[in-house]
Structures are given as C-alpha cells and as structure tokens.
Amino acid sequence: MADDKAKRSGPVPGRGTEFHISELFFSRTDGRGVIASGNAVFERISGFTYDELLGAPHKIVRHPDMPKAVFWLLWDRLKRGEPVGAYVKNRTKAGGYYWVFAVVMPITGGYLSVRLKPSSKMFETVQEFYRRLRARELDAPGDFTPELSGQELLSGVKELGYPDYVAFMAAGLTAELMSRDRIQGKPVDDRLEAFDAMSRAVGDIFKEANALYADFRRIEQIPVNLRLQASRCEASGGPVSVISANYSNLAREALAFASRFTDFGQRVLDEISLGLFMMGSARLQREMTRTFEGEADSGAPIDHKREMALLSAHMQRCGDMARNTVGRILEQSERFIDDSRRMRRFISGLDVTRVTCRIETGWLSDDDGGFHDIINKLDAFHEDVERRMKHIDSLNDNIIERTTALLNRSSRRNSAPPPEATAAE
C-alpha cells in the first residue's frame, strides 16, 4: 500500500513530491528548450497539465534552489552535441519539489531528457554540495556569472574525487541504477558491474604508470653518483663511468616512453567514463520505451506513435554509442600491449647494463661502501619496476577480457531487435 500511495501522490505546497522508485518519465523539447512532449508521469508529478506544459519553456519546472552552474554545464555540453547527466531539483506547480537524476541528450530537432528517482549515497553528498554552491551564488550574485559558477562546480567535482564531470555523471547514473535495482530486489546489472571493474582497473593502471614515471625520475641521479664514485678510482674506474653513462641514456629514453603509459591511462579512463554513462543511458532508455508503450491509451494530447518511434530510435542510438565506446577501449588496450613490450625492452637493456655495472664495480676498491649502496638502489629500482609492469599487464589483460565479453554479449543481443523497436517501426 505504501508503494501505491507514493505512486499516486501529487504535488504538495513547499514539500517534496513523492513518486515511486520504479517510475521513469521523460520530456522532449525543441532546440530552444520549449517542451514538445512528455509522458503521463511527468504531467502528474509536475502538477502541470499537458495544456500548461506543451509549448512552455522547460524552465517552468526549474527550482530556485538549483545552482545555475548545473544548467550552464548542461547547456554547454548539449550545444556541443554531447550527452549530459545531472542531479536536478525541480519545482511543482503547487510550489513543492521533486529530485531526479536526469539524462539529457541531443536528438534531431531538439533534446530528450529521461529522469529517474535518485536514492543512492552519492545523492546525499550531491545535495549538500549543491547547497554550498547555491549559497555562494546568492552571496555574491554580481561575482558569479553562470560560467564562473560552472567552473566552481567542476572544481567541486574534483574535490569529491572525480577527475572530470564525465566521470562524475557516469558514477552518478551508475550509483542510481544500482541503488534502484537493490531497492526493487533486482539482480545486479553485470554490464554496469563490468564497466565499474574496468574503471577501477584503469584507475590502478594510471596510478602504477604515474608511480613508474616517478621511479624513473628518482633514479636520474644514481648514474651521476656512480660516475662520481668511479672517478675516485682514477683510470680503473673508466669502464664503470662508461657503463653509467649508457645506463643514464637508456633511462632517459625509458622515462620519455613512460609518459605514454600515463597518457594511455587517461585516454582509457575517459572512454570508460563515457562508456559507463552510455551503457546506463541505453538501459534507462530501453525501460523508458517499454514504460511509454503502455501509455498508448492514456488519452494524452500527444502523438504516441511518433513519440514511440523517436524513443525507440534513440534507444538504438544509445546502445550503438555504448558499443562503439567499448570497441575503442578494446583497441586502446590492445595497442597498449605493444607499448608494454617496448617498455620491457627498455627495462631489459637497463637490466643488462645494471648487471654489467655490478660485475665491473666488483673489481674496484669500495672501502666506503659507495658502490655497494648505489648498486643496491639500482637493484631495488628494478624490482619495483618489474612488479609494476606485471601488475599493469595483468590489469590490461583484465580490461581486454571484459571488453571482449561485453562486445560478444552485445552482438548476441543485437541479433534479434527488441519487440518495442520493431513495433514502433
């Protein structure tokens, strides 16, 4: 009964408007943001009638508590043809409010926004983040242009632990879909789980790559110290000086190449964030299409058949974008195997030089233990590098395995068109 009550409840002045966790709703606008269509759930929750919604600017449901930064960022991405996701607090006609996580994308002739009810821990964090940001906007309205406030929002996203807004919105949509599944007693979405695991794996590669780069920077002084130690042995130290110079040259080349590892990590992190968001969006769009199919006899003043065709086409487009992103991740990961092999060749060259150096220093006087300490540092460096490379290769293999599985699953899924898409066509 509690579920039914939440599903039926309408707007209450000054209070939150409840809707059921299972409900989804959408609205479609033209390129100016004027509402062209929407489903019955949108009409009920907003408290506005179709006559009041259709032809009205979408800001008719904008709540004054919302930071203007969110809308600046939303429009900035949409105008560049990019999808966007955001937590949004909307107002009802009666003065109440309701929170949503909105997935908004450009479509032919305008924009489509699909919304679900947020319920995750991340949602709690975002509400407080929005409160602080909106307070700053209101305290200094003359200083906070929408763009400047948008930059504050992006800085805040990084403080929350996300490298950029795409990673933030991907994490938000994933958190809400998984929380929604738990509340409804549904099984874990293994596709979202796979993307989440890949994201963690690439994050670990990024950390290891940065650490590898830092390791090479730290040993830059060691060959110099080795040459200084060898110079004390006069002519007998000549071979060691030559070997240390060779080591130094090889290490510089390896250091330059190590930056490609960090570049790879950043590129794949970006792709995974977008892929995770598009995978969640495709799933959301499929459910929205099925839900709207059941509103055919609702008597709403919209062209149901036309909207079904638009929703079905957009559902297919979201799925294609998700699959394309997975394909790009796989390509990047396979190319990374070659980079890893080249790095190992650099490391092998350094290792041979290190062993040769150990042999040569064994013939020299080492009363103060200087050679021994330097060689031990090189040994420790090579052990660290080998451990990091093994971990990086293992993580990359895991990403390749998961992306291949996702692409194979997607191919099987696409062998038969979904019933709602076929009906709409």
Image (cartoon, rainbow, N blue to C red):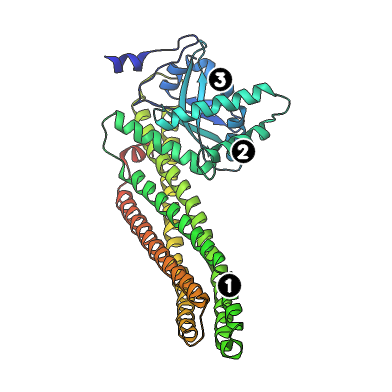
Of 34 and 303, the residue lying toward us: 34
From this view, report whether residue 12 is shown above or below residue 179. Answer: above
Give the percent coordinates (x, y) of residue 308. Answer: 41, 33
Q: Residue furthest bottom?
A: 235
Residue 130, image quadrant = top right
Q: Quadrant of the N terminus?
A: top left
Of 334 and 215, the residue lying toward us: 215
Which residue has dot 1 on it?
Answer: 252
Which residue has dot 3 on it?
Answer: 63
How far apart in space, not on screen, are marks 2 and 3 (Cα)? 20 Å
Q: Residue at x 49, y 43 (%)?
A: 167
**Mark number for residue 76?**
2
Q: Is residue 140 left or right of residue 294?
A: right
Q: Amino acid at mark 1?
A: Arg
Res 56 visible: no
Q: Residues within 10 Å of mark 2 (few under 14, many from 20)?
A: some
Of 355 and 26, the residue lying toward us: 355
Q: Residue at x 49, y 72 (%)?
A: 373
Of 168 and 274, the residue lying toward us: 168
Label 3 element class: loop
Label 1 element class: helix
From this view, report whether residue 164 is shown above or below residue 340. Answer: above
Q: Amino acid at mark 2?
A: Asp
Q: Amino acid at mark 3?
A: His
Q: Is residue 388 left or right of residue 365?
A: left
